Amino acid sequence: MKINQKRFQEHMETLAEIGRIGETGVCRLAHSKEDREAVDVVRIWMEEAGLTTHIDGFGNLVGRIEGQAKDLPILLLGSHIDSQPYGGRFDGTAGALGAIEVVHTMKDEGVTPNRTIEVICFADEEGSRFNKGVFGVRGIIGQLEDGELKRKDKNGITRLEALREFGVEPDLSQSPVYKQGDIEAFLELHIEQGPVLESKNKPVGIVSAISGPIWLTVTLEGFAGHAGSVPMNLRQDAFLGASIITKEFNELVRKEGTPNTVGTIGSVQTFPNSRNIIPEKVEFTIDLRDIDLDARTRLERKLYEIIEKTSKELHLEYSISEDTRSDPRYCADWIKDIMKEQDEKLGYQSPTLMSGPFHDALFMSYISDYGMIFVRCEKGISHNPLEFAEMEDMQKGVELLYHTAVKIAQS
Ligand SMILES: [Zn+2]
């Protein structure tokens, strides 16, 4: 291998200690003290790799090495180093540290890039703290929305306050940093977060596309009443509505979705949340995704019918707000071709697979061609301390990333 396996492993192990929970978990929430600590450490590794670094007005950590041909569109590599509140050691970090390892290896090998290369650790990919993620990447491509800095975490801290605490004066006027044509390719390595590579017994995969998620928040409002005194036929039970919608939505996706469609109701809040009061208000999230946009649109329409019908039957008021809507995005054929060619030379015989989860790369795809490399992870578990990927698999993925990046940097 060209990459320095030992150095990459040490970086992975060191980063896993920052915000560590239990033996194998990690909690590095976006813009938190732990996130800042991680950024400071990773920044040193970027500089050791020969990158000039800065933290931008969205909280992204960016490293840059000038190419010989300064007018060529740049090569961008990276991922994120923030985590879920009860997250694992590999999600994001494998790709972020893998990207730095790629540039460091070029330095070790005496490869001077023809194209300028930037490595980026995107701020708040995960989205759990402010219930809206991919903040950093949306910042650089100009997809921020009104009120982004006013969103609050569960302790009432706004993103503005959190970013200041993190040590960044938010500057949304920097958005967009890049426009179409500025970037030749964006490459991201990531753990698969699914069971496909494991089932194929392959350490590495080449991604074909990222399926597009819709995130909705549904609010149902009924009427509270004493659980002991209000007869069943006079109730307006909001939680019952949420339960029926959950069940019917699940059946809809199973029966009428494609093999790639997935639908989840993952967060539910009931009010007043008391054992002897009929739930008056329930708020729940819906996540619906597919690689096939028409199929997803068809199911989304039927989902609205289910919500409408259920609310009517139970005499509930409902409202639906849309938090995220992304179309499926396909990886560039020319990048996949380079990956396949390099993969063949390395003898990995990596399969091609799609990504159900979205990544920073999904957003980069709106202004740049992109490619992704997946690394096998145990049982597809992620967003959990049990998340596990073999070091050897990650090193193989980074090696493929290296050869792909060199090819593009020198073109
Ligand atoms: Zn991730």
Image (tube, helix red, strand yellow):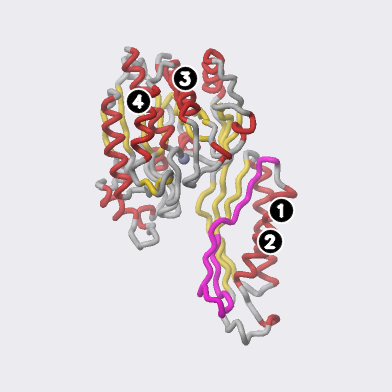
Give me the C-alpha separation between circle 3 and circle 2.
47 Å
Label placed on residue 404: 3
Label 1 sits on a secondary structure element that is helix
What is the distance, in whole Å, between disc 2 and disc 4 at their CAs? 53 Å
| Residue sitting at x 48%, y 34% | 190
Q: Residue at x 46, y 39 (%)?
A: 91
- Distance Cα–Cα, label 2 vs label 1: 10 Å
Visible residue check, residue 133: no
| 4 vs 3, front mark | 4
**What numbered label is drawn on residue 306?**
2
Task: State whether residue 69 is above or below residue 174.
Answer: above
Hey, what amino acid is under mark 1? Answer: Leu
Which residue is label 1 attached to?
A: 252
- Which residue is located at x 38 percent, y 55 percent? 147
Q: Which residues are magenta?
A: 259-284
Element carrying mark 4: helix
Mark 3 Cα-neighbour bin, 10 Å: few <14, some 14–19, many ≥20: many
What amino acid type is highlighted by mark number 2?
Ile
Q: How far apart are the two marked residues, 4 and 1, measured between alpha carbons?
A: 48 Å
**274 within the magenta span:** yes
